Image: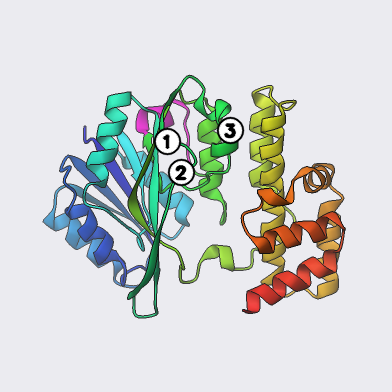
């Protein structure tokens, strides 16, 4: 059994793929496998994957029709044989010692999950690095018992899967897979994971993963019409988890779930800005969303200082005042900058 299975979903990433493949080949921990899932690419990605698999027995190539990143990651999970799972994206890459550091930390603590820091890299149109900064974690150390319940405020909205190592046996025991949402499927996976009460979490401050901060054609910057009818599925999953734990009356858990609801609302506003809807139609959607009891309470109870940017604090204030049109105009102005 390999120590780690890297799962890499690929769609039309011929330009970036050689870099991430080189970073895997350079790993100082050699006992790993890399499962490359070509998700119906129309460029030369499949050929690069086939070449990597032919040259290195640790690389396995799966070629399937386009089904989206969730379907590709699920195919990787079905094929994986490693003790731990490491998800990564094809326009990112990992430090040479990433697998070794993470596996040693996981093995020493018998961890179900290891979370770690990131490098946030920005590139120009010619793939030249413009800027990088590190992004750490809210915690650091080894946490046992019920770490996600006990540190819910720090961990509940940690929706990325690419900065976490997961024990594969735990995922299989609870039959955890990615739901087929176009947006937020990684967040739903993370919520489903911690809902099952993993017993040991390790958090490392060390950045080991290079995340491309400005992604070309990012789905989060595209219009998703399905969000007009189903915008709060991620925060609903958080609330359902809190309720399943019997902690809906806990101030800490309620406050964080409220924050997740407001965060979903902000995503809905951003989605409207990419839509073909008129300002009147956008305003009607936002007013309707604010009439939902859970959303109305979350907006009222969430403090401005909990938002991570000045722009979001201003938008939350406007939402508290029910100035829907002003929120939309501000969001549209920010998008044009």
Say few, some or many: other residues with alpha carbon within 10 Å of mark 3 (under 14 / 14 to 19 / 20 or more).
some
Task: Tell me how far mark 2 sits from mark 3, CA to CA.
Answer: 13 Å
Circles 2 and 1 in contact, beta carbons < 8 Å: yes
Residue on which the image places disc 1: 140
Task: Tell me how far mark 2 sits from mark 1, CA to CA.
Answer: 7 Å
Residue 12: x %, y % from top left:
38, 68
Say few, some or many: other residues with alpha carbon within 10 Å of mark 2 (under 14 / 14 to 19 / 20 or more).
some
The answer to whether 243 appears left or right of 291 in the picture is: left
Say few, some or many: other residues with alpha carbon within 10 Å of mark 1 (under 14 / 14 to 19 / 20 or more).
some
Write down the quadrant of residue 323 in the picture.
Answer: bottom right
Could you tell me if residue 208 is visible in this image? yes
Q: Which mark is residue 137?
A: 2
Q: Residue furthest top?
A: 145
Q: Is residue 321 above or below residue 200?
A: below
Which is more foreground, mark 1 or mark 3? 1
Circles 1 and 3 in contact, beta carbons < 8 Å: no
The answer to whether 303 appears left or right of 234 in the picture is: right
Q: Earlier in the sequence, mark 2 or mark 3?
A: 2
Reply yes or no: does residue 173 show up in magenta.
yes
Q: How is the image coloured?
A: rainbow
The answer to whether 233 appears left or right of 300 in the picture is: left
Reply yes or no: does residue 76 show up in magenta.
no
Residue pictured at 71% horizontal, 26% vertical: 250
Residue 315: x %, y % from top left:
75, 61
Circles 2 and 3 in contact, beta carbons < 8 Å: no
What range of the chain is rendered magenta? 167-177
Residue pictured at 25% horizontal, 40% vertical: 101
Q: Earlier in the sequence, mark 1 or mark 3?
A: 1
Residue pictured at 83% horizontal, 47% vertical: 296
Q: Which mark is residue 20?
A: none
Residue 49: x %, y % from top left:
25, 60
Residue on which the image places disc 3: 152
């Amino acid at each position: 059994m390999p120590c780690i299975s890297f799962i890499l979903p690929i769609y039309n990433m011929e330009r970036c793929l050689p870099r991430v493949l080189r970073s895997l080949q350079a790993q100082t921990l050699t006992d790993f496998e890399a499962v490359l899932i070509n998700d119906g690419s129309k460029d030369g990605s499949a050929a690069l994957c086939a070449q990597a698999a032919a040259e290195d027995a640790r690389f396995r190539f799966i070629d399937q029709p386009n089904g989206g990143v969730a379907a590709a990651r699920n195919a990787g999970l079905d094929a994986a044989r490693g003790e731990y799972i490491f998800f990564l994206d094809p326009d990112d890459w990992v430090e040479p010692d990433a697998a070794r550091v993470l596996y040693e930390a996981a093995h020493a603590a018998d961890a179900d999950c290891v979370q770690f820091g990131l490098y946030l890299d920005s590139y120009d149109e010619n793939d030249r690095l413009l800027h990088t900064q590190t992004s750490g974690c809210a915690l650091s150390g080894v946490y046992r018992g019920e770490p996600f319940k006990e540190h819910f405020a720090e961990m509940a909205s940690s929706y990325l899967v690419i900065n976490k190592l997961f024990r594969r046996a735990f995922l299989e025991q609870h039959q955890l897979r990615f739901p087929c949402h176009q947006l937020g499927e990684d967040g739903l996976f993370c919520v489903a994971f911690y809902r099952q009460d993993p017993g040991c979490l390790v958090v490392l401050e060390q950045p080991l993963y290079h995340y491309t901060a400005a992604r070309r054609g990012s789905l989060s910057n595209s219009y998703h019409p399905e969000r007009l009818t189903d915008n709060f599925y991620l925060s609903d999953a958080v609330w359902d988890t809190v309720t399943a734990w019997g902690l809906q009356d806990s101030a800490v858990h309620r406050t964080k779930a409220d924050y997740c609801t407001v965060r979903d609302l902000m995503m809905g506003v951003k989605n409207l800005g990419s839509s073909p809807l008129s300002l009147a139609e956008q305003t009607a959607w936002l007013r309707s969303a604010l009439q939902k009891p859970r959303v109305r309470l979350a907006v009222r109870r969430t403090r401005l200082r909990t938002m991570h940017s000045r722009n979001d604090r201003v938008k939350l204030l406007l939402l508290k005042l029910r100035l829907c049109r002003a929120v939309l105009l501000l969001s549209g102005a920010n998008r044009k900058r």
